[in-house]
């Protein structure tokens, strides 16, 4: 009953509108499958209407939003640049390593065998030239020396006697002997005269006469001998005897000098000023000839020996001043010599440098020394700051060069800055030959490159991360 009344009222409301006609009677759906199908269709229709409405709303909103205006200004980026110039060569610093060597170092010992009785130095002691270091027992040598001195004194006394000649008393005795014989000879002459007279008278025999004659002849010979002896004494000693005795004296003197030399060599003295670096023996030891007792190292004039390759040795000249680094300090050194032979192990030639005297107490033999040599290498290229490089393709390097272009004419766009000149960026591939610190700009690195650059090209040196090929730029100082 209620449903019928509602249908009648709905028909009355729409009766004046011809579009609305009463729906034909619908069969009542009682199947569950039909109910589910109608539910799904209703949900799909609602979703489709929602999407359509959203799209229509967005379209109308986009039509109502005004379009942004195109910027009428373009900023040309300022860049820092440099003008490249070609170079024919460059210098590199090479460090060569050597060591500190003492000017002199000696293993000191004795020239003869003996017993070590005194050693007056220890390791680390500094000694000057001539300082006694050690001594051997010389008691037997001293005894031999005294004996030779006595023999020499005897020979010298005899030499003086020969040089002085005979004594006056000896000469007087020789003269008296001559006179005595002369008197005896005169007496025998008188006796002979008497005997001859007696013989003629027949008073004596012939034999008695001959005895007197024989005695006279004997006295004559004795007189000749006495005169010769006297003349020898008067003439003095022969020069040959004096020279022979002088030779004997010299021989004894040389033997004494030899003993004194051996005694002197029984004491080891410092041949140069230095420091005792080792003590090989102690007192009481019996040493052999040439056996080392102490090691002495000179510390007044240290040297540095550094091996230099043959191709770089021409950079050093004898007498030139160099800077040598030992530890954390740098010392001035003078090239004293360059050895002529090549070391077969290192294939280098040894340069010997004398360190300044002030380095003597600060360095020790065996310390590592480094010598820096500037070497010129003939290679053509261009110097660029390291900041000018950008990575290229396949691991290569590039840089940005500027090419001047005419001021662009824009129809609807104008420049915000009135630059005098405008440039276009071009990429240039380069090869890095050498990298070093730029001494003119502190610690900044610079590189030597070659490639598609030409002399006078303008290259961007900073801010390359903001640049792309073809970009318009201007110089930073424009």
Image (tube, rainbow, N blue to C red):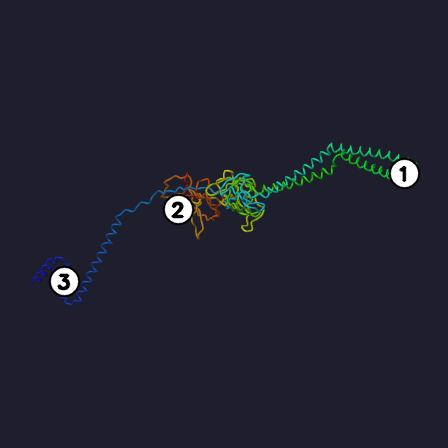
Would you say 407 lies left or right of 127 here? Answer: left
In percent of width and height, residue 37 lies at: 19, 65
Image quarter (top left, top right, bottom left or bottom right) of the C terminus: top left
Q: Nearer the viewer, residue 229 or 135?
A: 229
- Mark 3 / mark 1, whichever is N-terminal: 3
Would you say 67 lies left or right of 188 here? Answer: left
Visible residue check, residue 478: no
How crowded pointer 2 is (Cα within 10 Å; few <14, some 14-19, many 20+) is rated as few
Q: Which residue is mark 2?
A: 465
Whole-angstrom CA distance, mark 2 to mark 3, is 77 Å
Q: Residue at x 73, y 33 (%)?
A: 167
In percent of width and height, residue 97 lies at: 50, 46
How crowded pointer 3 is (Cα within 10 Å; few <14, some 14-19, many 20+) is rated as few
| Pointers 3 and 1 in contact (C-beta within 8 Å) | no
Q: Which residue is mark 1?
A: 204
Residue farthest right in this picture: 201
- Mark 2 / mark 1, whichever is N-terminal: 1
Q: Secondary structure at mark 3?
A: loop
Q: Which residue is mark 3?
A: 23
Would you say 152 lies left or right of 226 here? Answer: left
């Amino acid at each position: 009953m209620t449903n019928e009344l509602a249908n009648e009222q709905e028909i009355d409301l729409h009766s004046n509108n011809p579009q609305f006609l009463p729906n034909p009677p619908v069969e009542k759906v009682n199947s569950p499958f039909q109910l589910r199908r109608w539910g799904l269709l209703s949900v799909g229709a609602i979703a489709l209407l929602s999407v359509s409405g959203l799209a229509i709303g967005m379209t109308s909103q986009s039509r109502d939003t005004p379009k942004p205006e195109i910027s009428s200004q373009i900023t040309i980026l300022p860049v820092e640049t440099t003008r490249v110039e070609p170079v024919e060569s460059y210098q590199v610093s090479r460090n060569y390593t050597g060591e500190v060597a003492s000017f002199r170092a000696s293993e000191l010992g004795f020239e003869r065998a003996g017993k070590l009785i005194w050693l007056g130095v220890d390791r680390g002691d500094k000694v000057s030239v001539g300082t006694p270091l050690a001594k051997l027992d010389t008691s037997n040598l001293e005894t031999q020396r005294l004996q030779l001195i006595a023999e020499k004194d005897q020979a010298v006394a005899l030499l003086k006697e020969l040089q002085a000649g005979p004594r006056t008393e000896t000469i007087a005795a020789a003269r008296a002997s001559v006179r005595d014989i002369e008197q005896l000879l005169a007496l025998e002459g008188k006796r002979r005269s008497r005997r001859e007279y007696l013989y003629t008278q027949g008073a004596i025999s012939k034999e008695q006469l001959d005895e007197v004659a024989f005695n006279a002849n004997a006295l004559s010979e004795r007189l000749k001998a006495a005169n010769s002896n006297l003349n020898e004494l008067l003439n003095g000693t022969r020069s040959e005897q004096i020279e022979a005795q002088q030779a004997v004296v010299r021989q004894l003197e040389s033997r004494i000098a030899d003993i004194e030399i051996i005694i002197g060599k029984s004491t080891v003295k410092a041949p140069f000023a230095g420091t005792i670096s080792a003590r090989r023996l102690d007192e009481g030891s019996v040493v052999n000839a040439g056996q080392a007792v102490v090691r002495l190292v000179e510390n007044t004039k240290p040297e540095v020996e550094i091996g230099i390759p043959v191709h770089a040795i021409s950079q050093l000249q004898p007498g030139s001043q160099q800077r040598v680094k030992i530890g954390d300090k740098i010392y001035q050194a003078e090239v004293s010599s360059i050895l002529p032979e090549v070391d077969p192990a290192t294939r280098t030639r040894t340069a010997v440098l004398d360190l300044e005297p002030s380095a003597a107490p600060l360095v020790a033999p065996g310390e590592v020394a480094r010598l820096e040599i500037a070497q010129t290498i003939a290679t053509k290229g261009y110097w660029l700051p390291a900041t000018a490089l950008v990575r290229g393709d396949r691991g290569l390097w590039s840089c940005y060069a500027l090419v001047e272009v005419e001021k662009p004419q824009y129809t609807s766009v104008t420049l915000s800055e009135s630059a005098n000149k405008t440039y276009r960026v071009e990429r240039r591939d380069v090869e890095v030959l050498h990298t070093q610190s730029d001494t003119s700009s502190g610690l900044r690195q610079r590189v030597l490159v070659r490639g598609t650059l030409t002399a006078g090209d303008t290259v961007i040196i900073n801010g390359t991360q903001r640049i792309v090929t073809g970009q318009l730029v201007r110089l930073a100082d424009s």
